Structures are given as structure tokens and as C-alpha cells.
């Protein structure tokens, strides 16, 4: 909501009077004088008029969870145990998942109540790198890295995936970097080259890297540098 409209909605002042108050430097956003009446105010911002609180901020939550295999990436489900059940009950209704993982996959999962932030993290057009550790049923062929770098065509969506980087670590093990997050993307990419994924573990999303000492099922708040890394 625009700053002038918010003030008029939460005080006795009209929108025109609110704009004059803003121009006079009597309005503060997050404890700093705001002079742009068109400034967009989100729910995490604090707004004051002459030192009196007009709008209190909502607490922002940014969590890293080590998702175990067998948990569904969903806020609720009538049949399966969800990742929300790994969190304290008061937090559960507040959060959504930024970048889901299949029930049979493990690794880094992000949970937040900041929708704009999570969209910047996961939007395909932003092409945030996501790194996975993959184990396959068959040895990874020598030409698979080249095929992935060229992009894999998905007939159902009639599109070709963005170039991906594959680092072979062992005959049936690799580290894969992709820049999208399409439905079952990693499994479908390997299927396209005649292989099958046995296990999939997400190590990182952008600059946010899963802690090596964070046990499956455990979580922690992101530090400010991790939050700020999502532009």
C-alpha cells in the first residue's frame, strides 16, 4: 500500500493531508524520515507519525530446514507427513515453502513468510543456481555433461531447460547445478539421457548453503547476510 494511503486509512487525516505531513518530514518509515508519498509499504515496515506508531511491523521469518526423505513439501496434507510438522506449532500457519523438494528427496528447504523475497529466490527468470547431489541407477555416461549443458527438451511443456552443469564424482554420483526448478526437473533430465535418479539431495540455493552440521529434520534462522544475498 502507498504511504499516503496507509496514513489516511489509519488516522483522521485525508490522503491530501497525509501527503502534506509526509512533505513536512513528520512521517517515519522504519525510524527514518520518509518524504515520498508514493512509497510502497509492506507488512514488515514500521510507520510512525510525529513519533506515534501508525503501523507495527510483522515479524519476518526466514528459515533453513534440512528436509529428510519421506516428508512432503507442503503446508498440509491428509495422507502424508509434511515438513511443517518439523517446526514449532506456532510458526506453522505463518510460513510457506520457497522451492519445494520431492517427498523422496532431501536437503536444503527454505521456509518464510516473506512472499516477495521467496519469489526472488525461486522465480525461473532470475535463474538462481540450485546445486544437487545426485545418485543414479546406471553409470553416468561421458556425454551427459554435454547434453545437460546444451539443455534438455521437455515435450510436455514444449521447452528446453536452461544450460546446466554436471560434475561427475563417481560412476553413479554427480553434482548438478540447475537454474530453474521445474516439475521433477532433475529426474526428467536424467530420464532423457537413459538414466534414473535413485537419490537427490539439494545442497544450496544461490548463496544459501545447507549447513553440514544441520541434522535431517533440524532447522535454523537464516543470518542477515543470507537473507540479503537474495536480490
Image: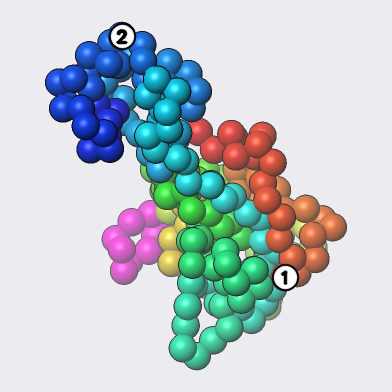
Depicted 8 relative to depicted 204: above or below: above
Q: Indicate the position of residue 144 as horizontal and vertical percent values.
A: 60, 58
Dot 2, how many residues are within 10 Å of its Cα: few (below 14), some (14-19), or many (20+)?
few
Dot 1, how many residues are within 10 Å of its Cα: few (below 14), some (14-19), or many (20+)?
some
| Secondary structure of residue under mark 1 | loop
Q: Residue at x 33, y 56 (%)?
A: 159
Give 47 or 107, whichever is nearer the viewer.
47
Depicted 136 relative to depicted 115: above or below: below
Quarter residue 49 falls in? top left
Q: Residue at x 31, y 25 (%)?
A: 39
Quarter residue 182 falls in? bottom left
Left/right placement of residue 226 relative to residue 76 reads: right
Give 57 or 92, whichever is nearer the viewer.
57
Residue at the top extreme? 24
Query: Is 155 part of what is drawn in magenta?
Result: yes
Q: Which stretch is magenta?
A: 148-160
| Secondary structure of residue under mark 2 | loop
Q: Are marks 1 and 2 in contact (CB under 8 Å)?
A: no
Query: Is 4 part of what is drawn in magenta?
Result: no
Q: Residue at x 50, y 90 (%)?
A: 79
Q: Nearer the viewer, mark 1 or mark 2?
A: 2
Residue assigned mark 2: 24
Residue assigned mark 1: 217
Left/right placement of residue 160 relative to residue 176 reads: left
Give 218 or 134, whichever is nearer the viewer.
218
Q: Residue at x 84, y 57 (%)?
A: 213
What number is the disc on residue 189?
none
Depicted 16 relative to depicted 207: above or below: above
Residue at the right extreme? 213
Q: Indicate the position of residue 11 as horizontal and vertical percent values.
A: 26, 34
Quadrant, the N terminus: top left
Amino acid at each position: 500500500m502507498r504511504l499516503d494511503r496507509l496514513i489516511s486509512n489509519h488516522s483522521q487525516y485525508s490522503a491530501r493531508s497525509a501527503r502534506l505531513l509526509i512533505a513536512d518530514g513528520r512521517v517515519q518509515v522504519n525510524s527514518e524520515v520518509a518524504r515520498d508519498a508514493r512509497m510502497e509499504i509492506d507488512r514488515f515496515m514500521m510507520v510512525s507519525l510525529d513519533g506515534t506508531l501508525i503501523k507495527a511491523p510483522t515479524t519476518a521469518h526466514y528459515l533453513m530446514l534440512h528436509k529428510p526423505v519421506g516428508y512432503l513439501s507442503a503446508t498440509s496434507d491428509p495422507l502424508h507427513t509434511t515438513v511443517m510438522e518439523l517446526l514449532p506449532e506456532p510458526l506453522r500457519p505463518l510460513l510457506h515453502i520457497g522451492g519445494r523438494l520431492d517427498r523422496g528427496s532431501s536437503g536444503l528447504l527454505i521456509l518464510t513468510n516473506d512472499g516477495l523475497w521467496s519469489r526472488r529466490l525461486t522465480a525461473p527468470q532470475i535463474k538462481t543456481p540450485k546445486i544437487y547431489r545426485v545418485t543414479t541407477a546406471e553409470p553416468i555416461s561421458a556425454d551427459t555433461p554435454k547434453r545437460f549443458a546444451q539443455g534438455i527438451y521437455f515435450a510436455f511443456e514444449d521447452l528446453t531447460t536452461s544450460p546446466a552443469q554436471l560434475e561427475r564424482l563417481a560412476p553413479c554420483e554427480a553434482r548438478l547445478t540447475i537454474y530453474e526448478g521445474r516439475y521433477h526437473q532433475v529426474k526428467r533430465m536424467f530420464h532423457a539421457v537413459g538414466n534414473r535418479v535413485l537419490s537427490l539431495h539439494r545442497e544450496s540455493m544461490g548463496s544459501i548453503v545447507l549447513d553440514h552440521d544441520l541434522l535431517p529434520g533440524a532447522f535454523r534462522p537464516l543470518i542477515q547476510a543470507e537473507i540479503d544475498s537474495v536480490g
